[in-house]
Image: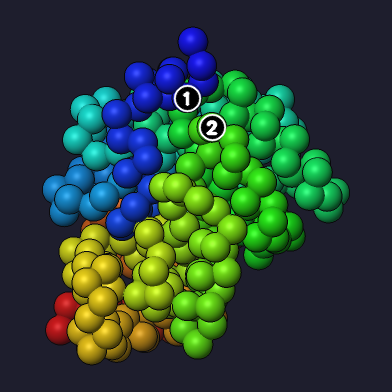
Amino acid sequence: MSLAIQMSQTTPYAPGMFRGLSAFPITPADPAGHVDTDGLVRLVQRLAAAEVDSIGLLGSTGTYAYLTRAERRRAVEAVSASLSGRVPLIVGVGALRTDDARDLARDAEAAGADGLLLAPVSYTPLTEEEVYQHFVAVAEATPLPLCIYNNPGTTHFTFSDALVARLAQLPTVLAVKNPAPSPSEARLRHEELRARILGAFAIGYSGDWNAPAAVLAGGDAWYSVVGGLLPEPTLKLLRAAQAGDEDEVARLNARFEPLWALFKKLSSLRVVYAAASMLNLTQAQPPRPVMPLEDDNRRRVAAALQMLEG
């Protein structure tokens, strides 16, 4: 049986799971890195109730790099069981070693994931050929559909359009999660990549402050940090962008601007942990050595949340 046929039988959502709003929640855990699965399920159930298009578990916001293999699997098992197939579940499987990433991919499949998100995590800078072979190896480990995670701010590797196009020829690599370019560059950058790739390959974007403009420019998905915390207002903004309503996008995005400013200044990870505690969703703290925000910045986060509520 071919890999493409296996994939179609294993995952009913492909390739549609890589379109629309993919909401990325934090992964609450204790100081020893033991995942609070009950707290995680509560976060995820809010996203499912809001009818997000997919849930991105164990992404950067989900602090996958700080968790052991066993805890990552516990998280996937708990979330998959709680969703019961209602929402596509995309799971991050990035790891330093290729064999570890393959094991994580197999774990995710066994635990109930519908798709995978793979970043080329490395200490030693990687070449394009090394990244390509890494993806080939992980794609061969499981028939689950896979999304390329282009996150140069963390991995210090930037996918060229040529490499994305090459990877798109693999039968289970169906999407890319790119950092959203500036609004002035979004349409040109999107069209340049789209011209290289035929078929239903999905081009989506992260970087919440620029992602709505990237969707307006033709992007297929918004991989969202804030969507994992505040799904309803994020969905409204995404739907306006999908409809091509520039005026509505501008109006709604203005309410997010104080939050975007804090994301850029303090990091979205620190901000979203603080916001989650203010909303009484979880009192979990970021994994050390990342520190929680101090009081003055927490007040700024509270004001940004009030702006959205208003």
Image coords of residue 164 (percent x, y) = 63, 52
Image coords of residue 199 (percent x, y) = 45, 47
- Residue 55, above or below 286: above
- Residue 272, above or below 71: below
Q: Quadrant of the C terminus?
A: bottom left
Mark 1 secondary-structure assignment? helix
Image coords of residue 129 (percent x, y) = 80, 44
Image coords of residue 221 (percent x, y) = 37, 59
Mark 2 secondary-structure assignment? loop
| Residue appearing at x 57%, y 69% in the figure | 192
Q: Nearer the viewer, residue 28 or 209?
A: 209
| Residue appearing at x 27%, y 25% in the figure | 81
Q: Which mark is residue 88?
A: none
Q: Nearer the viewer, residue 255 or 118?
A: 118
- Residue 235, above or below 107: below
What is the number of callouts on the image?
Answer: 2
The span from disc 2 to disc 1 (Cα, nearest Å) is: 6 Å
Q: Which mark is residue 4?
A: 1
Q: Residues within 10 Å of mark 1 (few under 14, many from 20)?
A: some
Q: Is residue 134 left or right of residue 185?
A: right
| Residue appearing at x 72%, y 31% in the figure | 98
- The residue carrying mark 2 is 171
Q: Decide which of tag 2 and tag 1 comes sooner along the chain.
A: 1
**Does the CB distance between marks 2 and 1 fall below 8 Å?**
yes
Amino acid type, residue under disc 1 in the picture: Ala
Amino acid type, residue under disc 2 in the picture: Pro
Is residue 111 shown to the viewer in this render? no
| Residue appearing at x 30%, y 35% in the figure | 13
Which quadrant would residue 140 be assigned to in this image? Answer: top right
Which quadrant would residue 169 be assigned to in this image? Answer: top right
- Residue 129, above or below 60: above
Which quadrant would residue 154 be assigned to in this image? Answer: bottom right
